[in-house]
Image (cartoon, coloured by chain):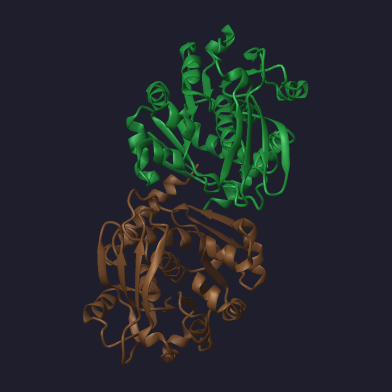
Chain colours: A green, B brown
């Protein structure tokens, strides 16, 4: 089966203590759709401007993405620039140009509206809601969000939470959403806001899934060096959803394995800037790390 | 089989944002030996002063500890007082009275010197070395350490590292020891300093074991509320060593299961001040959480 991936399609300029990389292919939907593509065909929903390089379109094509839902609009592509500190857990935004996503309201191609797996990658919650309005047969809807939307669009986030099956967010965002420092205590409060499944991302420390089968404590693939963590969370959820869409049987049955696949896909994302590494790996590289991680986490 | 546990036997006064608890039973050896006692008989090595309450001796006895190696000396018991902030990851020492451990140099009862499992819980590295000097048939020697000793007694720590099988330390101490922020990259450098096994504790995020069988990424038992994390690291290594001493076969074969037992024992420690909770649980409580954690970490 195939899946829909909606979110930002962006140009990212990323500074770390070691290097500077201008105008990389970035955005939540780019990372998530490329990650998903190792497992299933991803149908992209996003908007780019006139400055969006042809080579990035070719990169999407190389990964078999369906681009019918990619809107080419007059104006600039969404551009984020940010800087990481030495430990890579602290980043600050240097500049944001919304460009063509400022007044973006996606209209889906009709074949998209029947896709069973729906990933609302990080973008304004109203845009996520607008995508959902058009879906007709969704089997599993996952939304990602970020601190920005909790700060400036909380009512829209809360409205969205009632319409999705699964919310993915990081540990500090989970604490912020329900005002509870302890993540394990925050999770039941997030369920009360709507989603049947909650996944809390903890970066290098893995993630926690909460659902009808209780908690799943998932490890991250250990990396000796993190070059650029931008997009790792998007790759995680993209890999997970790509895996789910590729499997038969219930989501409940496949979700743990999906999280491990997402976690491993995200590990590659961290090993170079933007999508540089993820667009060079093969499915076999992911499978190898999944086997390694399985050995590393068994007793 | 049984094991030796050497370290501090202390009185702890602990303040958190929620409560204040003066003169609790504390110290690395107290926490580790009580944790170990659920699996094996622990032989305690430590020193207490005239002010050490009889009720704490009774508590040791209730847990079946062998107290022949507990030195009753003239003077005050080692006393630590500290304060935790809201998130429990930040603590500061308010006061330390070394008392009877200031010039402490343990002499072991002769039956202790043949114990196969040796846990050098956190105390000055020279004292840990002095205990090791007297051991005759040790099968597996584990040492714990802390930032204090890396700051004020680094040469003694480095000397000790060449004599032990396994070093246990937390993530920030691992980074400090080899000046490497990335814990996964720090581990091979720690092996080069001596120990065949390295265990990095990450608190609520679990731990990482590195040894001849590669890495083991171990989860922590998830807690909705942490009341007082003092002694959790000691409980972790104590539970692990108690388990190892209770099992047949090689350390390599049993170590992963041992880490899970230690991790679960430590979870109880965090649920009340000092040893209040750990001294009230039964082996069956630990076994139940081990089963739960096994379910929560499988895919």
Residue sitting farthest toward the top: A110
Count of marks overlaid on the render: 0
Q: In this view, does B186 lie above or below B147?
A: above
Viewer-proximal residue among A157 and B226: A157
Question: Residue B91 occupies which quadrant of the picture?
Answer: bottom left
Question: Residue A268 occupies which quadrant of the picture?
Answer: top right
Q: In this view, does B238 lie above or below A228?
A: below
x 29%, y 64%: residue: B273
x 40%, y 20%: residue: A163
> Do we see residue A167 in this rendering?
yes
Viewer-proximal residue among B7 and B42: B7
Q: Is residue B52 above or below residue A6?
A: below
* Rendering coords of residue A29 (x, y %): 60, 25
**Horizontal placement of B298 versus A22: left or right?**
left
Residue sitting farthest toward the left: B55
* Rendering coords of residue B151 (x, y %): 54, 74
* Rendering coords of residue A180 (x, y %): 35, 43
x 38%, y 82%: residue: B98
**Horizontal placement of B121 versus A31: left or right?**
left
> Do we see residue B141 in this rendering?
no
Q: In this view, does B171 lie above or below A43?
A: below
Question: Residue B111 occupies which quadrant of the picture?
Answer: bottom left
- Can you say which quadrant of the picture contains the N terminus of chain A? top right
* Rendering coords of residue B134 (x, y %): 51, 89
């Amino acid at each position: 089966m195939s899946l829909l991936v909606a979110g930002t399609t962006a140009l990212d300029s990323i500074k770390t203590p070691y290097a500077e990389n201008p105008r990389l292919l970035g955005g939540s939907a780019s990372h998530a759709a490329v990650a998903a593509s190792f497992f299933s065909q991803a149908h992209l929903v996003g908007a780019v401007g006139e400055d969006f390089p042809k080579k990035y379109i070719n990169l999407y094509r190389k990964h078999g993405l369906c681009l019918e839902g990619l809107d080419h609009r007059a104006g600039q592509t969404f551009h984020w620039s940010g800087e990481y500190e030495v430990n890579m857990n602290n980043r600050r935004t240097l500049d944001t140009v919304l460009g063509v996503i400022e007044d973006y309201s996606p209209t889906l191609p009709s074949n998209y509206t029947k896709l069973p797996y729906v990933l609302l990658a990080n973008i304004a919650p109203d845009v996520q809601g607008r995508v959902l309005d058009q879906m007709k047969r969704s089997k599993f809807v996952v939304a990602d969000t970020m601190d920005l939307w909790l700060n400036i669009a909380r009512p829209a986030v809360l409205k969205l939470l009632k319409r999705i099956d699964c919310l993915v967010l990081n540990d500090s965002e989970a604490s912020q959403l329900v005002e509870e420092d302890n993540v394990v205590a925050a999770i039941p409060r997030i369920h009360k806001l709507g989603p049947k499944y909650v996944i809390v991302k903890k970066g290098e420390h893995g993630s926690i899934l909460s659902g009808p089968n209780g908690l799943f404590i998932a490890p991250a693939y250990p990396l000796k060096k993190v070059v650029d963590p931008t997009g790792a969370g998007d790759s995680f959820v993209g890999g997970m959803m790509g895996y789910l869409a590729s499997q038969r049987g219930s989501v409940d049955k496949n979700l743990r394995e999906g999280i491990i696949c997402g976690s491993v896909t995200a590990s590659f994302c961290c090993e170079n800037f933007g999508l540089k590494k993820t667009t060079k790996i093969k499915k076999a590289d992911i499978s190898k790390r999944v086997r390694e991680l399985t050995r590393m986490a068994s007793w």
